[in-house]
Image (spheres, grey):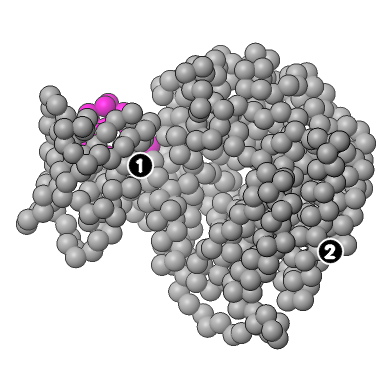
Amino acid sequence: MRTIYITGVPERVHPSLRRIADLFFETTDIVTTKEEADLHLDVVEDDRLTVCVATSDNRWERWIHLENSDDPQEWKRKVNDVFLQILEEMTGMKQPWGILTGIRPTKLFHTGLRQGQSPDEIETNLQKQYRIHSEKTALMNQITERQLAALPDLYELRKEVSIYIGIPYCPTKCAYCTFPAYAIRRKSGQVNGFLLALEEEMETIGAWLVQNNIKVTTIYFGGGTPTSITAEEMDRLYAHMYKTIPGVSSVRELTVEAGRPDTITPEKIDVLKKWNIDRISINPQSYTQETLKAIGRHHTVEETIEKYWLAKSMGLDNINMDLILGLPGETTKELKHSLDETEKLMPASLTVHTLSFKRASKMTKQRDKYQVATRDEIGRMMQMAQEWMAERSYLPYYVYRQKNILGNLENTGYSKKGAESLYNIMIMEERQTIIGIGCGAASKFVHPQTGKIERFANPKDPASYLMTHKEAIAKKIHLLNQTFSIDPHTNEQHEMGEQNESHSSRKVAGVSAKE
């Protein structure tokens, strides 16, 4: 960890400077005295801005001319820009995403399109304003084009919603994971209790949707691993969904994650087929058995391949598979093996994740135990994956980034043409309200006119969910009424005048998703 002492900078800018430093030093801390600091960042403002970074044995200095010294956003962006330049010179590292630390970079591209800019103009502006490298702006350009081809009415879907349903159970919890992933305890009756509470939440939300004539665009079962429950429980849950959620038979996409191949059986595939689930995920993460053991996945490589072909043979053709770059002990050699095995399957879509050290994961807490790829190695692995995808007509259609991601890279979803996950586009671009139901399910309430986003999350663990689900339901109904301007007493929708949403979208997408 590195420590930074900052002078001459308003405290509101400190978080963005720390995030930029984290790109180079993994973790940094802002300290209150110069004596305890590894770096001293000082900004002096007179007729120009002078930015200086000093260590115990060296000093770097840059001067900035501000076009509008009264604009706090320009001031902040310029200081971030110069701080990044100095750290690149100091460390020899290059940051392909520049000063952009937000997790949804393509939102900036969509904002530019909505404002009438051409794609080339947007790329130029992003390179200038955020120091994003040209290969990343080209990726953003390609992705937004694919998204609008898959969802031509993407910008008109704010009066609809999508639904995420969280099933918190998993055979084991992977070392890198922070999602809800609890062992099934049959004797305690917890699973049945959870499903009853989930059905209650589904029923109340469904009644609100019916009452207010709100359409559902997509439905996504995640977790955990939704196929961890029995075939009979899956059948009961999907039947309840069709009964309570309006228009399930006509939603544009219905996805169930079956990520752990050790949860897939012919009986469960029959249930998925019975209820017209049209997209599933079966996630190898790696095709090296030693890696699976190291990260806590208790299935074999052969089982992944067998379950993929089983699902295909039973009529499930739209299958996504995930690979993770940089898993412990892996280099380009292991990635090449995984890509060679993937070529034998050629699923409809592939998601390439870069390993991220999530704060609450086992891998982060015991980081010294896990030897992961170096920055240079992870860059080569990303390049290999990108070239492999392009050569086989897998095209990128969504991208997102995470804190503490190896190499300051990204996670990218690829698919064959027409096999894009519509839910993934919706959740990443935040163009409509996502209602989260079940354990760990995060709701995002997107105002149809302003684009303002309010978030609410259910508890991750089943016991807390069971105790608080009624309160969570009431809170979500309140937020839905507020978002869609529904009078809860009359159930009438108030007229909402058209407003310019670009400022709100820009505020959410900006340098950081939290700003």
Q: Position of residue 246 (x, y in %)?
A: 81, 66
Residue hosting label 2: 244
Q: Is residue 78 visible?
A: yes
Secondary element at image label 1: helix
Residue hosting label 1: 19
Three-letter code for the amino acid on which mark 2 is drawn? Thr
Secondary element at image label 2: helix
* Nearer the observer, 189 or 213: 189
Residue 243, quarter of picture: bottom right
Residue 328, quarter of picture: top right
Highlighted range, magenta = 84-96
For this view, does 513 lie left or right of residue 454? Answer: left
For this view, does 83 lie left or right of residue 285? Answer: left
Of pointers 1 and 2, the one earlier in the residue sequence: 1
* Nearer the observer, 304 or 32: 32
Label 1 neighbourhood size at 10 Å, few (<14), some (14-19), many (20+)? many
